[in-house]
Amino acid sequence: MTRTWTRWLPAAAVPVVVAASVTLAGSSAGADELPDRTPEQVLTLLASHDHQPLSGEFTQTSDLGLPSLPGDLPGTDDATTGVLTALDLIDSDHTGRVFVGEQDQARVQVFDTFGERDVIVDGDQAWFYDSGDDTATHLTAPENAEDAEHTQQTPTLTPEQLAQHVIEAADPSTALTIGENVQVAGRTAYDLVLTPRSTDTLVGQVSIAVDGETGLPLQVTITARGQSDPALQVGYTSLDLTAPDAGLFDFTPPSGTTVEEVTPGQHDGQGIAPGEQSPVEHVGTGWDSVLLAPAGTLDLSSQPVLAQLTTAVDGGHAVSTNLLSLLITDDGQVRLGAVPVEALQAVR
């Protein structure tokens, strides 16, 4: 349901898109004990998606070793702002709340130091609101939204969506094991551990706490290769699997908010219109895959903020962390992956 909206939200909203569908599987396990399952059975439990109303609070903690991000500078273009926003979202600690109502009803709130960012979906209406600068974006989905191809690659915050991206990488290059059962948000969960067999990825291990009754991913922990402490962890701190108040999905911008109306298909370079192919390409598979945005995406010569953030390397400028690497080539192509910078440089 709300995954459909990631095709239409403008670039400013992409980092906080919520995946509202959760998993619901047929288990009558109690809160204190779970039946024995193989790793493959737990993976199936996690991957068996269905709609489930819920309200939950979550936290994100990050320790990627990212260089300090520069502050906002005049003249920063939309593409640069999107990169800085995504890096800040991934590398900063956050708290938030998720609400899922009926089909096509979802809301996620991400709390910042001086405000909050909200994405609200209600039927064919979607809002992105940022209290930090009193701006909002509103759009209405076209009738063929369900048929459009997924065209956005989104940094993620909620356990559901982060788990979804991890599972997409869990091909034969991944070893699956089960750890000791864990307690997350007062619920008993299987500890599904995914270990990449590839030696080229920066990812060392991923642990997903899978709720033993519903299959809902309650917490995702990613550890970088050679590290013992998590590089990124997103998990629920409280969870209520009942329908929230329907009024939470009826959004009216506060007085004084600057509202931008967006028509899907008239994306002005920020989104992908129906029928268009995404300019972002995937190279490779599994944990070693690299995302490529085409030449001309970023112009370092006119964006000094990126020059402050990046380090000059052969063929461009790079940002290197213990879990992700970003390369901006001399012709403005952007390459991103959970691989060393050298692997990004080798992409042809």
Image: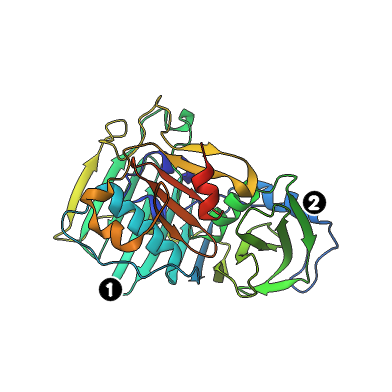
Residue at the front extreme of this rendering: 314
At x 33% / y 52%, what residue is drawn?
A: 82
At x 70% / y 52%, what residue is drawn?
A: 198
Mark 1: amino acid: Phe
Left or right of 218 in this view: 142: left
- Residue 234: percent from the left, percent from the top? 54, 66
At x 13% / y 60%, what residue is drawn?
A: 256
Q: Are marks 1 and 2 in contact (CB under 8 Å)?
A: no
Question: What secondary structure is marked by label 2?
Answer: helix
Residue at the left extreme of this rendering: 256
Please determine whether, in this image, residue 233 is positioned above or below residue 249: below
Mark 2: amino acid: Glu
- Residue 30: percent from the left, percent from the top? 77, 68
Disc 2 marks which residue?
Answer: 40
Residue at the top extreme of this rendering: 275
**Number of callouts in the render?**
2
At x 69% / y 53%, what residue is drawn?
A: 46
In the image, 294 versus 105, the foreground residue is: 294
Disc 1 marks which residue?
Answer: 114
Left or right of 313 in this view: 178: right
Classed neighbour count for the residue bearing mark 1: other residues with Cα under 10 Å, few (<14), some (14–19), many (≥20): few
- Residue 182: percent from the left, percent from the top? 71, 73
Q: CA distance from mark 1 to mark 2?
A: 43 Å
